[in-house]
Amino acid sequence: MSLGDAWDRIWGDITATASPSPQSLWIALGAVLVCVAVPSLWHLARHVVTLVHEAGHALVATLLGREVRSISLHSDTSGLTVSPGDARRLPLALKAFAGYPAPGIAGLAIAWAIGAGHGVAVLWVSVAALLIVLLRVRNVYGVLVVVAVGAGLGWAAWALPDGWRVGIACGLAWLLLIGGVRAVVELQGSRRGGARGSDADALARLTRVPGGVWVALFWLVTVACLGGGALLLAGAAA
């Protein structure tokens, strides 16, 4: 197959419409709930949530005119985005705030796309976004994570039939929506345990608003995204 033929096929996937079946939607939800509930599986799935978390920091930093120098992903599922630039409090606070809401917002956007019939396009757009993120990843483990996720989504987008592809897009939406909330639960637990190096603590230092308030705002955004995304997905399969 020539490069032109491959592009035509991908473009056809992006512009085509396909709706999820109720079975694929609820199977995807069940699979994600298992992944979130089982610690060993969550450790693996958490890398996807962290990846989107760090991409959220990077996107907001870029929009604010900051240089995204590096993104790192670590085996303990933590991450770090380095973006030197404007040192004023507001840009720094906006960048610090962006991480925890990012998975929920991305999941909501994916749910909207699935509801509009573009579940297959979600996979190709995700692969393209991962390629952009890969350009800024600066540690070996992070490269492995991005390549593994991108290769998996790319293979699914290329090789599987529409039903499976839309089902995987539903799974990705559920993972980001539910995983975004789970990440905030973990943040709250770590702060109760005495940890003070989180985005909420960075926001507290920048704004003099207590870290607990920022955790509550993360809760509000991620739970709202989960509720909205669930309604969109349920409507798509109705």
Image (cartoon, rainbow, N blue to C red):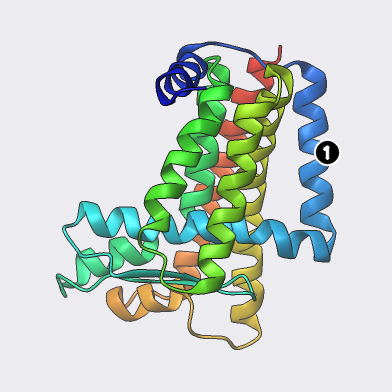
Among the 4 quarters of the image, the one containing residue 136: bottom left
Residue name at image x 42 percent, y 76 percent: 210
Residue name at image x 29 percent, y 61 percent: 94
Residue name at image x 29 percent, y 77 percent: 206
Compared across the picture, whether 203 is left or right of 227 comes to: left
Could you tell me residue 138's position as x and y percent? 41, 71
Relative to 16, does residue 141 appear above or below in the rendering? below
Check the picture and name the quadrant holding the C terminus.
Answer: top right
Could you tell me residue 116's position as x and y percent? 52, 15
Could you tell me residue 54's position as x and y percent? 44, 61
Q: Residue furthest bottom?
A: 194
**Amino acid type shown at disc 1:** Gly
Q: Is residue 100 visible?
A: no
Relative to 11, does residue 88 appear above or below in the rendering? below
Tag 1 residue:
30
Could you tell me residue 217's position as x and y percent? 47, 57
Indicate the secondary structure of the residue bearing disc 1: helix
Among the 4 quarters of the image, the one containing residue 157: top right
Given residues 217 and 149, the one toward you in this image is: 149
Residue name at image x 72 percent, y 61 percent: 44
